[in-house]
Amino acid sequence: MRTTINSLKKGEKAIIKDFDIDIIPLKLLEMGCLPGNMVELLQIAPFGDPLYLDINGSHLAIRVETAAEIEVELVQIKL
Amino acid sequence: MINENINVALIGNPNVGKTSVFNQLTGLNQQVGNYPGITVEKKIGFCKLPNNIKANILDLPGTYSLNASSIDENVVIELLLNKNDKLYPDVALVVTDVENLKRNLLLFTQIKDLEIPTILVINMADRMEQKGITLDIPYLEEHLKTKISLVSSRKGFGIAELKKQIITYKTISSEPCLNASVIDPEYFDSLRKAFPSQLLYKLWLVITQDVNFLNLERKEIQSSFTKSHSDLKRLQQKETIKRYQFINDVLKVGLKVDIAIAKDFRSKLDRVLTHKVWGYAIFFAILFIIFQSIFEWSKIPMDFIDSTFANLSSLASKNLPEGVFTSLLSEGIIPGIGGILIFIPQIAFLFLFISILEESGYMSRVVFLMDKIMRKFGLSGKSVVPLISGTACAIPAIMATRNIENWKERLITILVTPFTTCSARLPVYAIIIALVIPDNYVLGFLNLQGLTLMLLYLLGFGMAIFSAYVLNKIMKIKGKTFFVVEMPNYKLPMFKNVAINVIEKTKAFVFGAGKIILAISIILWFLASYGPGKNFNNADTIQRSKVENKGIEESEMSNKIASFKLENSYIGIMGKTIEPVISPLGYDWKIGIAIISSFAAREVFVGTLATIYSVGGSDNEDTIKNKMGAEINPITGKKVFNFASGISLLLFYAFALQCASTLAITKKETNSWKWPVGQLIFMSGFAYVVALIAFQLLK
């Protein structure tokens, strides 16, 4: 199954793999949402949307529908 | 020594403290205006530098990159691309936040490509130790080809050094720090060959952006070098990746963060403020405090202003020689100015709260918290900011919709924002509430008048949300929805920033609206003091002959004459003409006059009544409020401002679009007359119907 940002759990970290460039706004790319960068899900808003992320050190919120377009690979955190 | 004048431009991402740096450099020495033709705020400040050099400092709108997505951001590009602009900078200061350096440097590398001497200002340097950040300044300066200034606009350090650095602008490098054209060498080579005299990055911006470009045939470039939208975006992505690679490489050496120290108070606060119960509870508690305090705290200064002007007016009429000038002064100008100044306390409080909420970073959390709910009504979480700042004034609120990315959500926000209770409605509400709602407390602490005011605010919001819901169902506009909002760090609001903001906004409001109100007051005084025909000129004899045998007292007599005169003055005739339309709503012709004159701006309502009652009565010592309270309708024998007519008036002003500036800004932002005209018809028609129903039910 494809893992996307919206399937992360709170506190999980992942590496951005790929997305459809025509759907993702340029502004999000400029905020650091680029393949290879780290993303962490910090908070989920009440009612499950939007998502509060740390992408490459930038703190920002995006909607689930956008997050569902961004494919990621989960990073296993050693405890 | 010669005096030298240089232009300095402040550029930076939102939330990096750019405006604080601006305030530190210029103090109160600043001018706020608009860019010609568009309603983007233009802030210029002046600053004395060492060696007798003076600087014009331009605070450009915050932007994440030079790829503009709003007219605010467009302003930045248009200035930086136009060397002939008289504000074209001799030196650019790119302001960054030490904690977000990586992202902030993206814009910096773009500015460097424009070959303008650039200083990198790293702000919030006071937090470095706390966050475990160390910087290798010489390394960074070498690789970014710039000079670096470490400042803390909060603590005020580094500003003097920054000033010294600005005057060395001629020695600061204007070379780009990376070569972005490697992303597609073939394409950029041919572009360079076709336009050898132009900067490559400028050409690229002209191809990808929708900007005015003066010296260059925009069409010519685009026709031969255009690519499909999707190809251009792919190239822009490559460019962005390239820039980030460069930034990552530089920061790998130049920036060290001790992660153990980071991770903080921010996430704890976020957990509470965006909590599904506490988050909303705190938000509504804050709103409640704001509205209670606006009414409670500003009461004392408002009463003071009101009675001061009443005294001043009577002082003028008693001590100056009788005549047209004295009457204009005491009945037209003084009550007119009083009607403007009485706004100041409430407006200042409102702007105070709004700037604290924005400065602290809390507003972004509200956007996050409300997005899902607002979307049910066709709005965006970002609509919350316009709806809240609409409580100050719809004009800046409608401008604040520019960061809503989706056109349908933005349009709906623009159309419904004027329903929120703006500060111009406050004086109307305040005086009517004071007249018809008792000053009692329920449950021992809730002031009934304050509660009524809060209900009116809720009614405004409720109506805005409801109309949004209806519009969302009716309108068929398809568009990609996307939503990106930065969640800035929490900051303690800086007193200086908040104070300057409050002063500037209040000043702009008082002088902007003040001119209109004063002019209308003078016109009104004239229309109320003169009239056509025999009735007006012979008021004295007509009235005296009527009551000749009744042995009436002289003071009552002169009151009767004065009000007969007013009825037959020009304005009295106007009011009487529209009386049939408004009497079903419970208003008399005097209120009719006030509604006509406040068509262009609501706040004129109170000023108009002030003028009318000053002209109409012989006793100038009393306050406007008391005069209005004592007014009796001669037909019904009831008070003019009773509970039914008062509620009807409150509802009318809650819904009617009595504001010419709102119409103008809606036209500008939607680029069509269709929307403002629809807005006017719908809002004012609705207001009439609701006020009619309310009065007929309550009377």
Image (tube, rainbow, N blue to C red):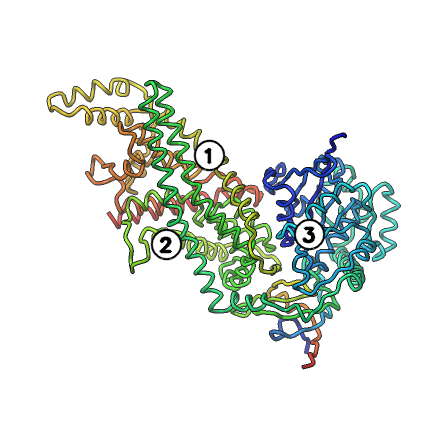
Q: Which chain contains the residue that carries disc 1?
A: B
Q: Are marks 1 and 2 on the same chain?
A: yes
| Residue at the image position 62 percent from the left and 45 percent from the top | B23
Q: Residue at x 25, y 49 (%)?
A: B698
- In the image, A8 versus B577, the foreground residue is A8
Q: Which mark is residue B455?
A: 2
Question: Which of the two residues, B195 or B313, is positioned nearer the viewer here?
Answer: B313
Chain letter of the residue carrying label 3: B
As drawn, the label of residue B151 is 3
Q: Is residue B567 above or below residue B49?
A: above
Disc 2 versus disc 3: nearer the observer: 3
Evaluate whether label 1 is on the same chain as label 3: yes
Badge count: 3
Residue A69 in the image, given as x and y percentages of width and height: 66, 68
How far separated are the C-alphas under marks 1 and 2? 28 Å
Q: Chain of mark 2?
A: B
Would you name the residue on which mark 1 appears? B514
| Residue type at the position of mark 2 | Leu
Instruction: Identify the secondary structure beneath mark 3.
Output: loop
